[in-house]
Amino acid sequence: MPHAILPKRPLLILITALVEPLLPWIAALLATPLVLRQLDVSTDDLARCTAILDLSALLLIQQPRSLEDQLAVRSRDRASALFLRWLGVAALVFGIDAFTSLLRDVPDRFLLEWLVLTLAILLVTGLALRKLVRVMLRNAATVRREARPHAQLVDRLDSLPSYVQEHGIDVIFIALPIAYIKRVQHLLDALHDTTVSVYYVPGTFAFDLIQSKPVDFDGVHVISLCETPFVGYGGVFKRLFDLVVTSLIMIPAAPFLLLLAGLVKLTSPGPALFKQVRYGLDGERIEVYKFRSMRVMENGAEVKQATVDDDRITPLGRILRKTSMDELPQLINVLQGSMSLVGPRPHAVAHNETYRRLIKGYMLRHKAIPGITGLAQVRGWRGETKRIEEMEARVRCDLDYLRHWSPLLDLKILALTAVKLLRPDSKAY
């Protein structure tokens, strides 16, 4: 499920994902009172029998899986695995009944009813929950895929990168034999100018890999060579974190944001907010909000970077840029889902089109949702890039972020950003 990123109902998906391993036991808990309430026994005996059955059903609890692994396992295989676990519980329950007196108050027919009802509830709820997670995770990607043409034969491998760009392909599976390693390497290099996810079937070798790991894709073992870290639980956690933290910031900060907007409007002609088109996740265009800090609003084929003593910058704008307060409206982008609190900084489209031709792997930075702050910024690579080496350093930081992302890394970057905001930055102008 390569593109199950930032689902629209992250909390609901997280809950269903966490419940799934416990679902078999929950099914047994639901079945127990439905069956045992028919018994005419004392309260103490009923409690004892209930506890034994519920404890036996603990064998049904499964090992937690990542969301992508949950989706990769076929429904038939999942049902078979659940049935085998159920047989183990049945053997344990009837063994307790045969060799101990713990279940002496429960006739065999009631035990059989409990097992059958448990299995029925288990299969129905388990498959329904699985279907629900699939629908929610694939909802965002489905709209895009339906608007695209079906796959077709491409004459030569050399034409594949251009085909990917023209048709917005999401995923590529490479099944060339290991003997063609040079051809695979050449193809992977060419695809670095896109945001496509790449899988190799199977085998590993020395590539510049991003989030490489083995994946069970609908029963087929493949290895991801280039993938976003925000698949499954990673994407759900990051989206929830963004929503919670941004909401906590926006509520008390709203009056201050309105005050800044009014000051921008009063101190120079033009709108308070500047909306610039930039590249977002997978290279798709998004509108990024900023408080207007210049007398011009460049948003075309050429966008000049701000420089020291830039006469386009207004007096108030210089303060806003120096303190990074001009970026505060991007909290709206975070709530919308087009940006994150932490991630590679989005560049103007004109800059992207320039640097993607000059820096190998430049477009891979778009395998993450762009952020208000990022690893490159806390390492000092922000502001004007006078030399190509400075942009290369920024891109290396962005790719390091993709390779090593974790929730703790996001927290660390936010903490370092807060520290940097308290100190003057010579690169901010």
Image: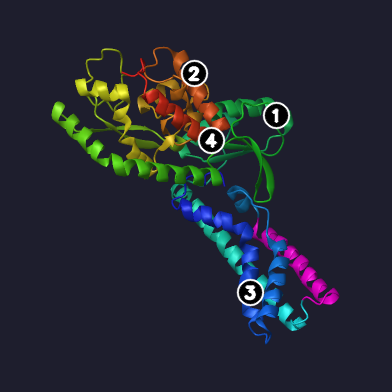
The local secondary structure at tag 4 comes to helix
Density class for disc 2 (Cα within 10 Å; few <14, some 14-19, many ≥20) is some
Judging depth in this view, the residue of 130 and 254 nearest the camera is: 254
Name which of mark 1 and mark 3 comes first in the sequence: 3
On residue 408, which mark appears?
A: 4
The local secondary structure at tag 3 comes to helix
* Amino acid marked by disc 4: Leu
Residue that numbered label 1 is attached to:
205
Residue 170, above or below 269: below
Which label lies toward us, 4 or 2? 4
Judging depth in this view, the residue of 24 and 194 nearest the camera is: 24
Q: CA distance from mark 3 to mark 2?
A: 60 Å
On residue 393, which mark appears?
A: 2
Density class for disc 3 (Cα within 10 Å; few <14, some 14-19, many ≥20) is many
Which image quadrant is residue 16 in?
bottom right
* Amino acid marked by disc 2: Ala
Q: Is residue 302 visible?
A: no
Density class for disc 1 (Cα within 10 Å; few <14, some 14-19, many ≥20) is few
Say which residue appears at 38% left-offset and 41% top-offset: 246
Name which of mark 4 and mark 2 comes first in the sequence: 2
* Amino acid marked by disc 3: Ala
